[in-house]
Amino acid sequence: MPIEHARTVSAVPPNMGASTGGEEELVRRPATWWVRLFGNSRSLTATGILFFMLLLALAAGTLAPYNYKDQLRGSELVGPCASHFFGTDYLGRDILSRVMYGARVSLLIGISATVLSLLIGVTLGLCSGYFGGKIDAVLMRFTDTIAAFPTLLLAIAITALYKRTPAENPDLLVANPSFWILFFALGVVGWTGIARVVRAQVLTIKTLDYVTAAQALGGGSGRIMFRHVLPNCVAPIIVLATLSIGGNILGEAGLSFLGLGIQEPFPSWGGMLSDAKSYFETQWWLAVFPGTAIVLTVLSFNLLGDGLRDALDPKAMK
Amino acid sequence: MNRLYGVIAMDIVCFAIFIALALAGRNAEEVNSESGDAGKSGKTTLANKGSLKPRTGGRELWLAVDSEPQTLDPISITDTISDGIGGKIFNKLMRLQYDEHRVLKPVPDLAESVEITNENRLYTFKLRKGVRFHNGREVKAADFVYSLKRLMSAMSKRADLMNPFVKGSKAYCEFKSDEVVHDDPNLGIRAVDDYTLQIELDEPFAPFLQHLCTVSCAVVPRESAENKDVPLSRAPVGTGPFKLAEKDWVANQYLRLRRFDGYFAGKPKMEGVRFFIYKDKTLQIKRFMAGQLDACEIPNGQVKKSTEEAGEENVFEWKSARTNYIGIGMPNGPFKDKKDLLPFGTNKFLRQAMNYALDREYLCKTILEGRGTPAIGVLPPGMPACKESRPGWKKDLAKARELMAQAGYPEGKGLAPITMLVRNDVDNKNIGQAMVNDFEKIGIRISLEAVDWNRFLEMVDKEPVPMFLLGWVADYPDPDNFLYVLFNTKQFNSAGNYMCYSNPEVDKLTEDARKLKDMTDRAKLYERAENIILDEAPWICTYHLISKVLLRKEVKGIRENATSLDTGTEYPQVEFMNVEVE
Amino acid sequence: MGTYILRRLLQTIPVLFGVATIAFLLSDLSGSPVRQLMGQHANPEMMKRVSAHLGFDKPMHVRFANHILHLLQGDLGASISKDGKSVTTIILDGLAVTIKITMGAVVIATTLGIGLGIFSAWRPRSWIDYSSSVFASLGISFPAFFMGMLLLLIFSVKLQWFPIGGYEAGYISNLVLPSLTLGLLSTASISRLTRNCLLETLSSDYIRSARAKGRGEWRVLLGHAFPNALVPVVTVMGSDFAALLTGAVLTETVFQIPGIGSVIAEAIFQHDLPVVMGCCVVFALIFVMINIVVDMLYAFLDPRIRHAD
């Protein structure tokens, strides 16, 4: 979600995007960044949790005790017990199973929307920074416009814009049109931070000797951008992307909470929370379990992002 | 160091602004008038601290509504909340009242009497004398002529109440004019003298008096209606028992209606009514329990709990004239080539099978928590001409399967999945899910398509959709409002017949019935029409709504008078004149 | 400085125009508001008349030009779903409420965030630092509405300290939990940023010399390091303030607060084009203005930064 984007992006220290080290430090990336990443207990835990969530999402079909849409008549609103670890909802559906299936929506949307944001953000940032001048001015005003737009509202408007048609095969997430709308809505609003960071990075790298040399040798701009400039932006991009996955998961939850999420009956964590709105005081399990799942997953992405930033930070070499 | 102080100073300034702003809107008068009284409910919890004091004294009735009224200009009112609030501010020629057989009938309100002549086409109203608008001016027949013409203006959203029934109304509406109302000698609405009004219809139309009971037909003073600075929609001026000053409508917080001492029928018993705007029903119920509301609706999942907490004596339930249904689109008329309406639109047995597969008992008992009774037909119980002895449909899977085989789809073999349109809110989606589960058992696979209300209407407006979940509460207590409006071929699409159901016999019966005057004669025709409709099943009738609200037992005058057309705590049809809080 | 501000102000014009255009396109393409105004069943001819009366019969570019012309004159138009109520009034009513919550949130976020940040930097890698970092990570991982629901559950339902939501002008108790929800979400990023910047400053030469002069630890931390570390913090606070306004949508939904967030969400769902456009333009204006103020503060706090160009 936009606001989360703003926050997570701003959590990156300012030295991340701008010039910090010299050329050598950027080029000679430490070979053992992953040792430093997983030497950090927090990153390790985060990665563990994420793998666990991924496992849940992939194997929900076999691991879940019930199907997500099974309505067990007669056991509506049962609290957590031996047969339903997380309880059941008002239609008698098993919350544990729904939380497991819900992981699919959150992870898939979080990651795919980030990929879309990356595609837009990196391309625009690169062009803006590399070409400068009028192109830069126009692209940056465009970025400002999107950033100045209340982004959650932009996403709401986009989701409201499209006709929400049900899936031919409701069990297959990617065949669900509402999935693509969410993907698109979150993807096209979340790229502004990425574009700005990439642009700043390019502006620094552009002035370095080897780029000037490549230009003097008559290298095409596309070639220079992708061969010389882009590789040096990879570190901040990876960090931003990891953090923005968390942001997109929150965004999906927010949209679902407002009733604009994935079509029923496919469960999503935000949608489950939205359904729990009028029950949560008496039937706390309806809200607490999906809510905790969101917090855990987003927390893991954020911790991993922090860990990656520390591990990839050239300063850590000193 | 200075900069640290700077931040601290900024914080203090922000905090000071926060406090100042937070306290800014506090209304001194209210604090004074309410803090002195002791809470009558006695349930003062810490949660009320620093907020609204518990409901006190017996002077004002405190109600809750889900949202602000969209408008209080009668000609624009289409939602129930505006209807409910407007109903306290305005009067019409007629109003609805139960007769000795507990049948809702139009009785004169601002009219003293009504005479129907010329083969049921000429209505002559004798008006009450001495009725005054909130601004003090007396109501004359010319005011009714103005108000009803205004109802047919381009800015009106309810012109359909007059057009095409009133003589010359079609031509009047088509006339392009810059004025809100214009002169038209051919229009069948005229003032004979100051206290006599005549309305002439083109053809006899039995429910016309019921139309006149709608709040949109209220009388408004021309001088206020044409005041551009203070529009009626925000500062309504009517003749009703309560009036609303502009300052008493606090945006998004509440509307405070005060007693109109010059009301023609005497002084209302209460000093006023306040409508608090709480979007969330959970919040309303908390306010009720804390003694800060006199009535509120019960949200889903809270019926049992809130009944226990509030006590049976504070719960009020009544039957609403509402039927909920699954509509099934049919390839009739201009839509005969629409492939997606097959096979449900043409195969009667499939639709009948759905009728027997549905577990209405479960729906009413568990999902609705007792706020519905299994549907027995199109007309809800309590509606004139409703045959309450109809058996309805019991869940019978064997019979449903048999019908499926008869339809040519044994166990659903060869049947493609179908889409059902539902409104995008939690309650409707839950009900839809539960039904989908029932139909799956006989092999009918349905997936829900949840869309917001505006789009829902746009989608069903243009052409029939394969299946949709909807309900209909009567505008006026006449079977015409169900059987003609929703099933006649002339009412295709947005006018009401969203299924595009068409049956010449039903058409003829419903058209004939609206020309007769006597309800017993009409009821016979309606029964035949309903029998045909139930057999062909363009509707899978699901349940009739039972409205259930929390209503403090100290409130007198609502329980006795709530009608089947009231569905929430706005009570549009209840005369608030005699309501009081003890 | 003067020309810099002027240039920044000029830059906002295309941004505002862009926002207005996007808002118009999105709400216009998503459908006309007329349908639901007419009630569940509507006579098609009547609907056409009302549509025409509201100007929806004109082609899209004419309507767009109309809106922009009015916007240029500072006229935000009239709401459709609220039957002609002035959009300016609607926005001002909403903003009045939202600004209260946002102010409260800023107070909470800065006090808590900077405080926690200083403590963490005072003893880096200690339990204080560690728990504050966990707190920070948790803070940015909470969906605003889930945080709100939990706070309601704890403080309103169980402890009954605060009302369960809703809003009446003039009472602070209604604003505490929403402010806390929003505030806690930004506390996290501010505290981490304060810590990191403080640590970075602490390792610089002039701090070392201050230490060498025998200044007390707290004196060094607060008197020398903190002011310099404040620069990036101010930037984040600025962008957070704008983000808080956006985040208000979900928070206001949970707490039933009639702020600008609820207003705009409702307007989008009702396709009330003038309100959507008005809100977006006002939002963008606030956002841009805050950014300019933040940049100026930035220059003021760090004399090394001069906007020469």
Image (cartoon, coloured by chain):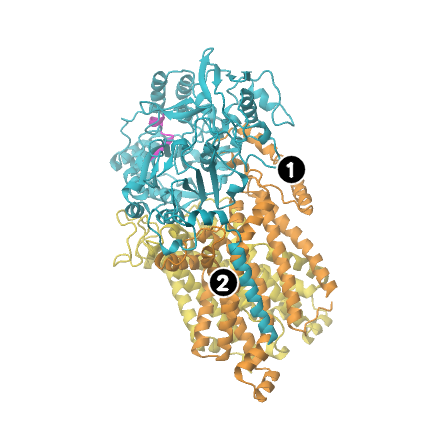
Chain colours: A yellow, B cyan, C orange
Q: Which mark is residue C183?
A: 2
- Of residue A220 and residue B204, the one placed in the foreground of this image is B204
Compared with C80, C132 (above or below) is below
Labels 2, 1: front one? 2
- Position of A224 with respect to B506 (left or right) is right
- Of residue A36 and residue C145, the one placed in the foreground of this image is C145
For the N terminus of chain B, give its image quadrant. bottom right
Q: Which residue is mark 1?
A: C59
Q: How many C-alpha atoms fall within 10 Å of the one at disc 1: few (<14), some, or many (≥20)?
A: few
Which residue range is magenta in the image?
A: B533-544
- Labels in figure, total: 2
Mark 1: secondary structure: loop
Which is nearer the N-term, disc 2 or disc 1? 1
- Provide the chain ID for the residue under circle 2: C
Residue B538 covered by magenta stretch: yes
Q: How many C-alpha atoms fall within 10 Å of the one at disc 2: few (<14), some, or many (≥20)?
A: many
**Which residue is located at x 26 percent, y 47 percent?**
A74
Q: Check whether the beta carbons of the residues at disc 2 and disc 1 lie within 8 A of each other.
A: no
- Provide the chain ID for the residue under circle 1: C
- Position of B315 with respect to C45 (left or right) is left
Amino acid type, callout 2 = Gly
Residue C107: x percent and y percent? 52, 64
Amino acid type, callout 1 = Pro
Residue B465: x percent and y percent? 45, 35
**Which residue is located at x 29 percent, y 32 percent?**
B403
Residue A189: x percent and y percent? 56, 56
Q: Which mark is residue C286?
A: none
